[in-house]
Image: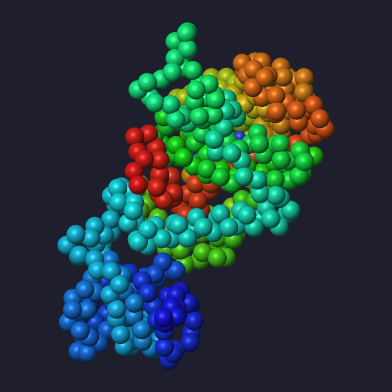
Amino acid sequence: MSERTKIKEILNSSKTDYQATVKGWVRTFRNNQFLALNDGSTVKTLQVVVDRESTDENILKNITTGAAITATGKVVESQGRGQSVELVADSVIINGVSDPDKYPLQPKRHSLEFLREIAHLRFRTNTFSSVFRVRHSVAFAIHEFFHKRGFVYIHSPIITCSDAEGAGEMFQVTTLDMDQLPNQEDGKVDYKKDFFGKSAKLTVSGQLQAELGALALSEVYTFGPTFRAENSNTSRHLAEFWMIEPEVAFADLDDNMDLAEDMLKYVIQYCLDNNKEDLEFLEQRLLNEEKQKPQNERSDLALIEKLKFCVSNDFERLTYTEAIKILMNSKPNKKKKFQFVIEEWGADLQSEHERYLVEKHFKKPVILTDYPKDIKAFYMRMNEDGKTVRAMDILFPGIGEIVGGSQREERLDILMERMEEFDIPHEEMDWFLDTRRFGTCEHAGYGLGFERLVQFISGMNNIRDVIPFPRFPGNAEF
Ligand code: 4AD
Ligand code: MG
């Protein structure tokens, strides 16, 4: 078998006059002679020059958009414009034909909505191959960042019986026959007869398990799928998304903010260094898309400039209370332009408020801390004021909340009181309380929404376009 050379390697090298074999999918074929080949290693295509005199008629006929082929020949300096090197083929093999009349991807611009319907083929477009190469880099850089700092990667369970966020947005996991549920005398389902002997769910967060790990290994992180049965049909929500949750012992909220800011900057810089061509392509894509929008809805900075800005500036840090003052005094609040007008301290922040702070007021990423206890989860550390908790949310331009985290309540008595306020029975979480009984310590962590970060870095507007096969209400195709 001949050795295969990736197209990226050929295009990124100035070497010429050597034999190579390339394999990939045909994008276009002009004049029965010039074939644009893409193999997914780069957004760019390699021009393969086919000798139409000596090549079999049957092969020529089957070099169509979408076909898989193998070409062997000499890499030479290109005579034509638009590329520096090309491959002059001695042989072309058709690995898999593609009927041009039926292949859904034509060599033209398709809408993102249409491509979402054919998500099984959208990997083959420039936009999606770039997005998924960036997604890979983001994942790799996250592991690298934590690995370099001595964190241990923990695999938290996907099936669980505890609602970590207490928001009641869990998908149920069961092997019971839905048409014939075993009922108890009171009419309720008898989960003792279910697979796990009780009602089980898909996890909404690996945090509670990460805390258990941190209180022994000191620094851990999870990176796994999480599930939320919230009926949110927005461009920022998925029913199945990936979350990264670091958890650090002997750390407070300031350490937590520093860690999150360092991590975000590290990952963005990694993509700037390693995905230049993809980001240039995605930047151009975004510029074209925004041309159709009115001036005031376009981004202030082009994609790469925005990423560089984010890496080289400190995030703005302020408390919820300070943010509420800014929002109450803001024009859109006074003129009732917000859909949810902020009337008083204690109001939950909606995405319109978060985006106002980030995009209009500070014009940079913002970290908000010390939220009212009533709008945050039970596990966050209570402040001296008895009204606020040591929470932090990181807000990004164009995205809103990208990270949510907190310093944890490490004091057993206060944690138990908080659980009572949230109607969480102590027995159900006894294992969690044990960490507070035996060797408890100050600790903190956060959750990063992986797809939201990929959205930010790739400049894609809809979260459904940065995960291969999005799950959202009414959709679990592919
Ligand atoms: O703010 P959340 O709900 O926090 C937690 O789950 C904590 N247990 C994290 C922790 O402290 N370890 O979710 C964390 C992040 C959000 O900031 C957001 O970026 C993302 O997860 N996220 C979603 N992303 C896509 N679709 C959804 N439905 C999301 N819900 C949250
Ligand atoms: Mg949150």
Where in the figure is residue 255, as x and y percent of width and height?
74, 42
Q: Which residue: 54% across, 35% down?
A: 159
Where in the figure is residue 411, as x and y percent of width and height?
78, 25
Looking at the image, is 39 positioned above or below residue 426? below
Q: Which residue: 70% across, 24% down?
A: 430
Q: On the image, which quarter does residue 376 sit in?
A: top right
Say if residue 207 shows up in the picture. yes
Looking at the image, is 21 positioned above or below residue 144? below
Q: Which residue: 64% across, 17% down?
A: 425
Question: In front: 1, or 284?
Answer: 1
Q: Looking at this rendering, what residue extends furthest in the right direction?
A: 439
Q: Looking at this rendering, what residue extends furthest in the top direction?
A: 186
Left or right: residue 234 compared with residue 258: left
Question: In front: 241, or 387?
Answer: 241
Left or right: residue 179 compared with residue 371: left
Q: Which residue: 47% across, 67% down?
A: 277
Question: In front: 219, or 114?
Answer: 219
Q: On the image, which quarter does residue 325 sit in?
A: top right
Say if residue 456 shows up in the picture. no
Looking at the image, is 356 positioned above or below residue 121? above
Query: What coloring was used for the rendering?
Result: rainbow
Where in the figure is residue 296, as x and y percent of width and height?
41, 45
- Quarter of the rendered image showing ligand 1: top right
> Which corner quadrant holds the N terminus?
bottom left
Q: On the image, which quarter does residue 439 sit in?
A: top right
Q: Looking at this rendering, what residue extends furthest in the bottom direction?
A: 17
How many dots with numbers?
0
